[in-house]
Image: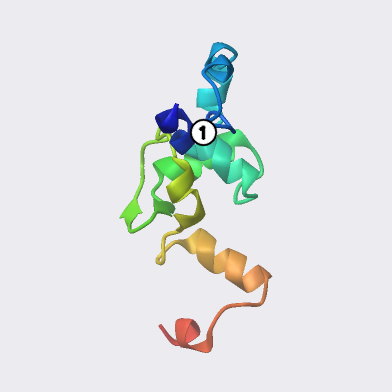
Amino acid sequence: LEKLHGLGLVNSRQSLAVCESLSAAAFCRRRLPCLLVKLRMAQNLRHAVTFVEQGHIRVGPEVVTDPALLVPRAVEDFITWVDASRLRQKVLDYNQERDDFDLAA
């Protein structure tokens, strides 16, 4: 029950009755592309899978290229763009948050 809660599949650690209603869709919602759509880093699932496969996304310090990665709750906050990603630069330009130091490089 603790592992299921750590993965983000169940919300409470109270009883095993919650595990009976656990479906395959709950596992699919914890995959990296689904979380990218949820975090609004991609418009739809197809774009999110493309971003992951092309190496634009990192989880913690590691660049992830496998879209089937299950993301636990503890690591969910560390999903970001790769520093050298062109998509990251476009997002920063659009939000007018790009640093002057990045423009010189």
Residue nearest the viewer, comparing 99 with 29? 29
The residue shown at (50%, 25%) is 27
The residue shown at (58%, 32%) is 12
The residue shown at (37%, 36%) is 66
Residue 6, x across and y down, in percent: 45, 37
Residue nearest the viewer, comparing 9 with 79? 9
Find disc 1 in the rendering and name its residue.
30
Residue 45, x across and y down, in percent: 59, 35
Give the vertical position of 44 relative to 91 (above or below).
above
Q: Residue furthest left?
A: 62
Mark 1 is on which residue type? Arg
Residue 22, x across and y down, in percent: 56, 17
Q: What element carries label 1?
A: loop
Horizontal arrangement in the rendering, residue 86 relative to residue 12 (left or right): left
Where is the N terminus found, in terms of image quarters?
top left
The residue shown at (56%, 45%) is 36
Residue 61, x across and y down, in percent: 33, 59
Horizontal arrangement in the rendering, residue 19 relative to residue 70 (left or right): right
**Colour approach in the figure:** rainbow
